[in-house]
Each structure stands twice: as C-alpha cells, then as structure tokens.
C-alpha cells in the first residue's frame, strides 16, 4: 500500500512533458495511406549550395504522470514530417516523383524508429514513475539509431538512384513496419506483454 501511495505521489509531482496532438502548419504525421507530395515541401529553392531535396523528420514524445496506467502509449510518440524545414529545388531535380518517393522511404524508416520508441516506452512505462529521464534516454538512443540508418540508406542506394539497392531497403522497411504493427500511432488497443 505504501508503495502504491508513493508511486501516486511521485507521479503527481513529476513534471510533464506534454506536446499538443494538433499538427502545426506544415507538419504531416506519418500515414500508410497519405504519402509525401511536392506540395508538402514548403521551402522552394534554387540554391546550388544545398541538396536538391531535403526532408526534416521529427520523432517527438510526450508524457504525463499517470501514463504508466495506460493500456498502450502509442499516442505519446509522433513521427512528423516538417514541411517548413524541408526543401525541394524543382529546377535541379530531374525526376521529382522519384526523389519524393525516396524521401517517403526515409519517412517510412523514421516510422520504424517511432514504433521502436513506442515499444520501448511501453516496455519501460513503469520507470516513468521515477521521472522522465527514461524518455530522454530512449529518445536519444532512437534518434541516433535513426540517423545512422538514414545515412546508410542514402549511402547504399546512392540517394535513391540505385534502384536495386533501394528495393532491398524498401522490402526491409516494409517487413520491420509489419513486425512493429501493434506500435503504430493509430492503434488504441491494449498491447499485451510478450513473455
């Protein structure tokens, strides 16, 4: 009884990292149905000093003191495309559709890591009662892992130009997304712990 009371007190006194579920202007939440389009890239440029096309992805999280009581924490982690921080140079990109599809592949890769974040948060949700440092630790690890995977994707596929390697990556990404299906943002059902 004392332990439960202590958990409740700690939970109430903990600070809350809370971000709005409302999308900001230019943001797009990852969706299996709604893919990126050229209109999502809000910065149009013709600057030779930059890449022809660049996408900014944000994996954000939120937490409140009693989140450890929820049946799943999928809504606490979002995978967003930030159109206001992404650009496209339509004068220099030869195949705009192909390059946007490659950016979508990177967005899909970010979704894998958002789902891994949700999974880790679910598995370690009782640690939230001790403070929100666990969220920051998971976030740092996930973002480092995503950055490395994104770099490897770009390098191995030659920025999406090597179609053979790109197909291998797409299949790998698709399989990983399926494997983490219960940790998609839209899932509101209770997630059972695997023994």
Image (spheres, rainbow, N blue to C red):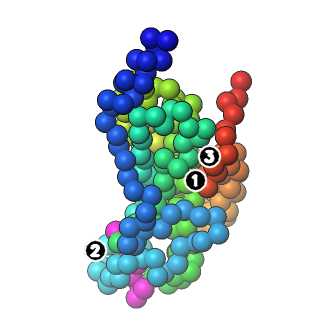
Nearer-the-camera pick, 42 or 91: 42
Q: Secondary structure at mark 2?
A: loop
| 159 relative to 95, above or below | above
* Figure quadrant of residue 116: top right
Nearer-the-camera pick, 192 or 135: 192
> Residue tagged by mark 2?
49
Query: Please, what is the dominant secondary structure of the magenta stretch?
Result: loop
* Figure quadrant of residue 179: top right
Q: Secondary structure at mark 3?
A: helix
| 12 relative to 117, above or below | above
Q: Nearer the viewer, mark 2 or mark 1?
A: 1
> Residue tagged by mark 1?
185
In the figure, is residue 135 to the left or right of 100?
A: left
> Residue tagged by mark 3?
183
Residue 35 x %, y %: 58, 72
Magenta span: 85-92
């Amino acid at each position: 009884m004392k332990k439960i009371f202590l958990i409740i007190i700690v939970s109430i006194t903990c600070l809350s990292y809370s971000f709005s579920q409302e999308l900001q202007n230019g943001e797009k939440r990852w969706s299996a149905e709604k893919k990126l389009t050229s209109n999502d890239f809000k910065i149009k440029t013709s600057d030779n000093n930059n890449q022809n096309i660049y996408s900014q992805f944000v994996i954000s999280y939120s937490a409140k003191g009693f989140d450890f009581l929820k049946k799943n924490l999928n809504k606490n982690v979002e995978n967003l495309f930030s159109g206001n921080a992404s650009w496209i140079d339509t004068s220099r990109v030869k195949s705009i559709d192909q390059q946007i599809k490659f950016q979508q592949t990177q967005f899909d890769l970010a979704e894998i890591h958002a789902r891994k974040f949700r999974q880790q948060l679910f598995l370690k949700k009782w640690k939230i009662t001790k403070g929100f440092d666990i969220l920051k630790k998971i976030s740092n690890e996930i973002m480092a892992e995503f950055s490395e995977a994104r770099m490897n994707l770009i390098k191995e596929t030659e920025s999406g130009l090597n179609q053979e390697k790109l197909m291998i990556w797409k299949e790998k990404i698709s399989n990983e997304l399926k494997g983490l299906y219960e940790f998609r943002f839209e899932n509101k059902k209770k997630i059972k712990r695997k023994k």
